[in-house]
Image: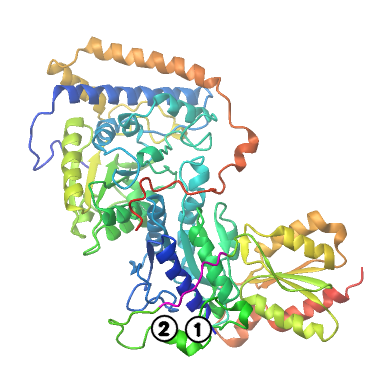
């Protein structure tokens, strides 16, 4: 197995403000509780399938907090994989909406009951629809980045995906299209490496020591970090984003993360002992620094658990989509994409 | 007279000057070549991509989502097969997000046999294309339609696949009805204006004729020839083959109604069914392989909805179910429908007695 890096190299080790640390803890905890509620809903028959991101919160939360949120070319485009609940909560998403998607209600704002849990879509925040095929987002992302390169400004394209999927040609597409000489793209290319593709370990399928190493061949700046530590993640994402925003060039960031409930409900979705739990580790650190107490953390967890349990009961009563709506939106009647339209000449 | 590649080029020019096209791209699409069939010569927004069809379709999706208006080319449809899941993704964008995101993009690609293109430059894509729900699918049969369908594709808020029959790309307009409006009547003059010279092109700039906005509606067929005896429904290259058959059969007193579908999806069932109700006999003709052929869908619908209208068995005349189109002339002819096959099938239908 690959050893996660314990420390980010070449980063100023400045302390993050306590307010930010508390905010990150709050969102990580909420994200975990949300995923656990989604898992419970699926197990109780209030959803057909669960997939999500418990174990990636220490990375996905800072990513959302650092994203330049908005619609159109001046803001960041997010081509996310299906383990990004932490990013969505950090952007300001209502966790109850995730329950709606799990329950396949008409009120599900991400897909109207059409798609799996964690398959988000939010045009108001440039969140491109998440799709189940692994890695296709790495082929689409250069397109939004091309428009942003032409537009200028500080908006960038962010794409995330897993380690196993980097074996797909789309990952090579992303590296090639983002690093064409003289046409480099403002892209933050992220791989969250949990060292598994469903049941198949990374070792045995990949010869490269680190996925990030593949960026070097294209002259892409790279970094591999311990994505289970939110402070490390925050600093690394910030540094990478600053570079991409300013230089308008790609950056490949590999974050070693955990997969705490396995791949999906198809593999049981039970808590897996022995993997680093970024939330627990961060809480221990926060308690040691007197920024948090165990009692306070437990209280936050049980309060939010209770709130989401109550919300899930309400969501259970919300209407499913009517059968005839299956024909809605096969074709668009008018174009709504593009935000400010400043990208068009 | 204008060729189809010139018509496509002029439509793309009008698209980028008047209708917001931002990117015309693909393999060898930009200078110096301007497309392997010359269809993108001299265009302001044309550029060369890496040799990566998945990247091309993916980039087009991303550009569309970011509010740009891309026209992406897959050099031959034979090389679009590895992009099918991305094409599905584009077609699903609006539906899967429940209307949150639309995906306004055009993919153009040459299709079909007829130029001795061997195994991997002769494929059809009709059946695959029409399985991509959420896409609009068009195939012109002449320069004017290519021009007007391309402009409609460009302004549509949905993904549109523009399939160009490669055997027709260099074929000139036959008569004014196939001509692009506004082009000089002297074809040498048009060529001087918009065809890149051989050799060094670095200083060459096209001079575009003033061609109008001509939007041929997506989803509407064209009656190529009125007739009362047999309906023939086709598109692309086989419009011309079927027209020849119809002309020959007219001398025998068989009047063929020939429908050029123009759009494979959405398709003009109103026009097709109205014609079948008139002639009571129908053949669906295309060159894609015959097993799970798009014509089979039209035939199924005919049987299900118009069974008691029919005076003869409806038929699909299509390519043979072979892995490819063989290069040798005899092999190609044995693979895709030929004039004689079609003429005989129409004759048999017309003479069939219930």
Q: Secondary structure at mark 2?
A: helix
Q: Identify the image quadrant of the N terminus of chain A.
A: top left
Q: In this figure, which residue is indicated by the disc labeled 1?
A: B184
B95 on left or right of B197: right
Q: Is residue A200 visible?
A: yes
Total labels drawn = 2
Dot 2 and dot 1 within a common chain: yes
Of the pair A42 and B262, the residue shown nearer to us: B262
Which mark sits nearer the N-terminus, 2 or 1? 1
A233 on left or right of A195: left
Q: In this figure, which residue is indicated by the disc labeled 2?
A: B193
Q: Position of residue B31 (x, y in %)?
A: 33, 76
Q: Secondary structure at mark 1?
A: loop
| Residue that protrudes farthest toward the right in the picture | B354
Q: Is residue B19 above or below residue B223?
A: above
The chain letter for the residue carrying disc 2 is B
Of the pair B121 and B58, the residue shown nearer to us: B58
Q: Residues within 10 Å of mark 2 (few under 14, many from 20)?
A: some
Residue range of the region highlighted in magenta in the rendering: B208-215
B82 on left or right of B218: left
Q: Mark 1 and mark 2 in contact (Cβ < 8 Å)? A: yes
Q: Position of residue A163 (x, y in %)?
A: 31, 46
């Amino acid at each position: 197995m690959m050893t996660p890096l314990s420390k980010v190299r070449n980063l100023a080790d400045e302390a993050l403000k306590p307010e930010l640390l508390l905010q990150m803890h709050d969102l990580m905890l909420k994200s975990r509780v949300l995923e656990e509620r989604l898992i419970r809903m699926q197990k109780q028959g209030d959803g057909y399938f669960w997939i999500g991101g418990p174990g990636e919160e220490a990375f996905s939360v800072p990513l959302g907090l650092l994203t330049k949120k908005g619609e159109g070319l001046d803001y960041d485009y997010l081509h996310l994989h299906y383990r990004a609940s932490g990013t969505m909560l950090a952007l300001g998403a209502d966790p109850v909406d995730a329950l709606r998607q799990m329950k396949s209600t008409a009120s599900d704002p991400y897909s109207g009951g059409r798609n799996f849990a964690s398959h988000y879509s939010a045009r108001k925040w440039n969140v491109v629809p998440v799709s189940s095929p692994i890695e296709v987002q790495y082929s689409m992302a250069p397109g939004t980045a091309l428009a942003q390169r032409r537009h200028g400004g500080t908006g960038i394209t962010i794409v995330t995906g897993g380690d196993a999927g980097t074996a797909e040609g789309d990952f090579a597409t992303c590296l090639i299209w983002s690093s064409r000489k003289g046409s480099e793209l403002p892209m933050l290319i992220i791989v969250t490496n949990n060292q598994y593709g469903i049941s198949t370990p990374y070792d045995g399928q990949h010869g490269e020591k680190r996925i990030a190493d593949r960026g070097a061949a294209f002259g892409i700046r790279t970094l591999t970090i311990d994505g289970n530590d939110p402070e490390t993640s925050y600093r690394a994402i910030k540094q990478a984003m600053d570079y991409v925003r300013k230089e308008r060039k790609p950056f490949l960031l590999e974050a070693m993360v955990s997969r705490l409930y396995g791949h999906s409900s198809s593999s049981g979705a039970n808590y897996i002992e022995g993997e680093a739990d970024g939330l627990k580790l961060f809480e221990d650190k926060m308690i040691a620094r007197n920024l948090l107490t165990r009692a306070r953390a437990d209280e936050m967890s049980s309060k939010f658990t209770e709130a989401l349990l109550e919300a899930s009961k309400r969501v259970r009563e919300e209407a499913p989509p009517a059968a005839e709506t299956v024909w809605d939106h096969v074709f668009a009647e008018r174009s709504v994409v593009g935000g400010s339209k400043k990208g068009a000449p | 007279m204008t060729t189809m590649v010139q018509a496509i080029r002029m439509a793309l020019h009008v698209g980028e000057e008047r209708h917001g096209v931002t990117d015309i791209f693909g393999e060898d699409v930009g200078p110096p070549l301007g497309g392997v069939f010359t269809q993108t010569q001299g265009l302001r927004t044309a550029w060369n991509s890496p040799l990566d069809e998945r990247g091309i379709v993916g980039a087009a999706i991303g550009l569309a989502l970011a509010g740009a208006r891309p026209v992406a080319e897959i050099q031959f449809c034979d090389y679009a097969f590895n992009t099918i899941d991305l094409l599905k993704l584009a077609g699903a964008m609006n539906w899967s997000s429940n209307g949150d995101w639309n995906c306004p993009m055009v993919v153009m690609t040459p299709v079909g046999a007829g130029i001795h293109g061997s195994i991997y430059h002769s494929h059809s894509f009709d059946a695959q294309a029409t399985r991509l729900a959420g896409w609009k699918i068009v195939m012109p049969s002449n320069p004017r339609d290519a021009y007007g369908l391309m402009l409609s594709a460009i302004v549509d808020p949905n993904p549109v696949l523009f399939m160009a029959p490669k055997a027709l790309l260099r074929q000139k307009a036959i008569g004014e009805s196939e001509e692009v409006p506004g082009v000089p009547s002297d074809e040498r003059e048009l060529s001087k204006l918009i065809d890149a010279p051989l050799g060094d092109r670095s200083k060459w700039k096209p001079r575009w004729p003033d061609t109008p906005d001509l939007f041929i509606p997506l989803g509407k067929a064209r009656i190529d020839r009125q007739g009362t005896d047999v309906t023939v429904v086709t598109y692309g290259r086989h419009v011309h083959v079927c027209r020849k058959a119809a002309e020959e059969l007219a001398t025998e007193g068989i009047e063929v109604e020939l429908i050029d579908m123009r759009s494979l999806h959405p398709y003009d069932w109103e026009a097709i069914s109205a014609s079948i109700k008139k002639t009571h006999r129908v053949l669906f003709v295309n060159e894609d392989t015959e097993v799970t052929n798009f014509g089979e869908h039209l035939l199924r619908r005919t049987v299900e909805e118009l069974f008691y209208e029919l005076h003869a068995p409806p038929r699909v005349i299509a390519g043979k179910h072979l892995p490819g189109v063989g290069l040798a002339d005899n092999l190609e002819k044995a693979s895709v429908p030929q004039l004689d096959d079609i003429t005989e099938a129409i004759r048999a239908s017309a003479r069939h007695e219930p």
